[in-house]
Amino acid sequence: MSGAIPSRFRARLKAGEAVVGGFVNLGSALTAEIMAIAGYDWLVFDLEHGAGDEPALLSQLQAVAHTGVAALVRVEGIDSARVLHALDLGADGVLVPRLRSAEEAALCVEFCRYSGARGVARYNRSWHWGLASRTNDDADAEVVCAVQIETAEALCDVNAIAAVEGVDVLFVGPADLSRSLGLSCPPDDPRLLERVAAVADAAREHGKAAGMLVGTIAQARAYRELGFSFLGCGSDGSLLAASARETATALLEMTDEGDIANGAHRLAQTEVRPG
């Protein structure tokens, strides 16, 4: 929906397409653009745990508008003002954290829809500052409402949450859900995989997408095989950190080897030979 250009991303989700993405947490328009042109289907701009704020979010949304990537915003919580502002800035949808029940899921949908509780204003970016010709119903049909399954309560109520009309994605938060379940395990731990199979099953039954953020392609493959179709791997910060560490380690190993070789060469040159 960025800049009031019609978005097909929600239609792709409803059609059951598998889509891939990543998180953007540095608050930088430049890294947002780099992530967007890399070829992802979606990006989540993280206002819950990321370094950016709403002014930075506006710059990031503007930076990716030309790329065609679906721009979703993880808001700070179940808060109508936060959802409203993210959508008015031109986001294609929101990801709402710390859900606990189907009732809270329905509230998230209400906040996303003009047919619900979303306030109407057209002098903002999502309406091309009043120049867009679409209707409220057009906008409602495009906005993605993704909710996070990251509490034990939400996992217990996941089938009812999936049944809520207007919820598009059931997105597992692996770290918080693991802690809530007392697992303290990484995304590829068999115990977590076993527990979140219920999320994939509920999503499949109700025609929704099951989502997950992981750290490696191997983990992503495991969740894809489980039935997850909204898959994210890493963030701008984590990808930069991993690449920087890998490169720095390789350079240090190279220079250490060079220092050893050079030292041996110098030793040979200065070795005193019998006359």
Image (spheres, rainbow, N blue to C red):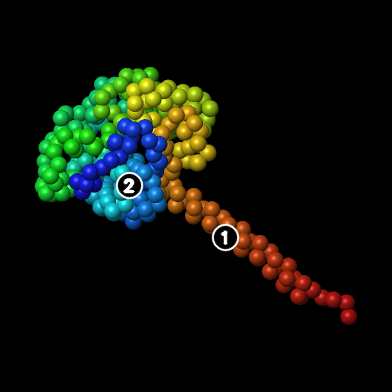
Which residue, as the protein is rendered here, is positioned at the far right? 275
Identify the residue under disc 1: 251
Identify the residue under disc 2: 69
Residue 151 relative to residue 256: left or right:
left
Amino acid type, residue under disc 2 in the picture: Val
Depth check: give the residue in front, 231 or 80: 231
> Image quadrant for the N terminus?
top left
Residue 121 relative to residue 193: left or right:
left
- Displayed quadrant of residue 175: top left
Depth check: give the residue in front, 267 or 90: 90
> Image quadrant for the C terminus?
bottom right
Instruction: Find residue 169 and report its horizontal and vertical position in percent.
Output: 33, 31
Instruction: Find residue 176 and report its horizontal and vertical position in percent.
Output: 40, 31
Residue 247 relative to residue 101: left or right:
right
Amino acid type, residue under disc 1 in the picture: Leu
Q: Name the mark nearer the viewer: 2 or 1.
A: 2
The reply to whether residue 124 is visible in this rendering is: no
